[in-house]
Image (tube, rainbow, N blue to C red):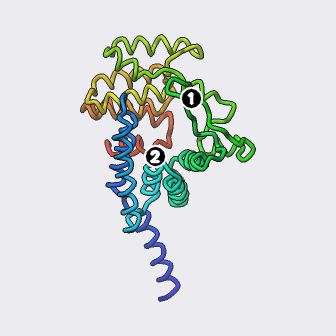
Amino acid sequence: MSTNQYLFFLLFSVASFAQKPDNAELKKMYDEDQKARMASTIDWVQLSKNDSIRQKRVYELIHSGQLITGKDYYHSAMIFQHGTDTTASAMAVKLMKRAIDLDSTVNKWLLAAAIDRDLMRRDKPQIYGTQYIKMGQDAKWERYKIDSTQVTDIEREYYDVETLAEEKERTMNLRSISEFYSESQSLEKTLALIKAEKVKGDTAIYNVSEGEINSFGYELLSAKKANDALIIFTLNTELYPNGFNTFDSLGECLLILNKKEEGIKTYKKSLELNPKNKKAMKIVNDSK
């Protein structure tokens, strides 16, 4: 084989590897893992059983060589992140390192969280500060013990982890919009609550952050309440007009409701706010 032939073969092999699709079964298990944790009420015993089944299946996929892309490794790492022992936590770290090696665009936060959880499982101080615990059912969330000398805030920001000065504990101890909705069974009352709490700012007792409202919208979508979700996603764009993800989620909901023209327009707005939003870029380009 000549040098030119070898180079062509090498480039072709790399290109073929890069074009490999993500493993659909892994993506499905990942989605199930995430959806189960977004429910307003969780049967933790059943969830633990399902987590074990998913982890067993991922082991099988690993042993049969079916993890190919960075996303495959990322999805697998998240499933092991929800394990209960050091074997699972060590697997999560190993898989996330491989995920980032293959695809630098995957959510790097999970590697920091996996490292911290593995340390916690081994009764050692975490280093990034991603892990929080409750000392009792009615207790407040507090950050698990941390060795703050091991990682700088610059490194934390690289992994999308909040700095140690940021008040995440306060946010975690705020009440949930979803819980209020479950108790009131009223979208109208929930809308009024969100608006009132947003005005309160730092004195709010409910979490009305952009991300929390967005998550509530997806809960409604999962419950087959797309029209109610549309109202929530729309409100989120009004409360956080500079958040590209709020428009991304609104666009998705509009398309689900077959409001294609409005949906594409909304995705274009998301793309204006974040030109690197690949999902919005693809949807807008495909609509032309």
| Residue found at the far front of this picture | 136
State the image quarter where residue 179 is shown.
Answer: top left
Q: Out of 96 and 100, give the one closest to the viewer.
A: 96
Q: How many marks?
A: 2
Viewer-closest of 286 and 23: 23
- Residue 60, placed above or below residue 111: below
Identify the residue shown where x is 57% and y is 50%: 118
Towards the viewer: 18 or 177: 177
- Rendered position, 144 above or below 120: above
Say what amino acid the circle numbered 1 marks: Trp
Question: Do we see residue 11 in this rendering?
Answer: yes
Q: Position of residue 80 (x, y in %)?
A: 46, 51
Other residues around mark 2 within 10 Å, as few (<14) / some (14–19) / many (≥20) = some
Which mark is drawn over residue 128? none
What secondary structure is marked by label 1? strand
Across and down, in percent, residue 164 comes to 68, 34
Rounded to the nearest whole Å, what is the CA distance between mark 1 and mark 2? 18 Å
Q: Residue at x 39, y 44 (%)?
A: 48
Where's residue 12, x and y in %? 43, 73
Q: Image quarter for residue 259? A: top left
- Residue 20 at x, y = what percent? 38, 63
**Quadrant in which the C terminus is drawn:** top left
Mark 1 Cα-neighbour bin, 10 Å: few <14, some 14–19, many ≥20: many
Q: Which mark is residue 141?
A: 1
Residue type marked 2: His
Q: Is residue 19 visible?
A: no
Q: Which residue is mark 2?
A: 82
Q: Which mark is first along the chain, 2 or 1?
A: 2
- Numbered disc 2: secondary structure: loop
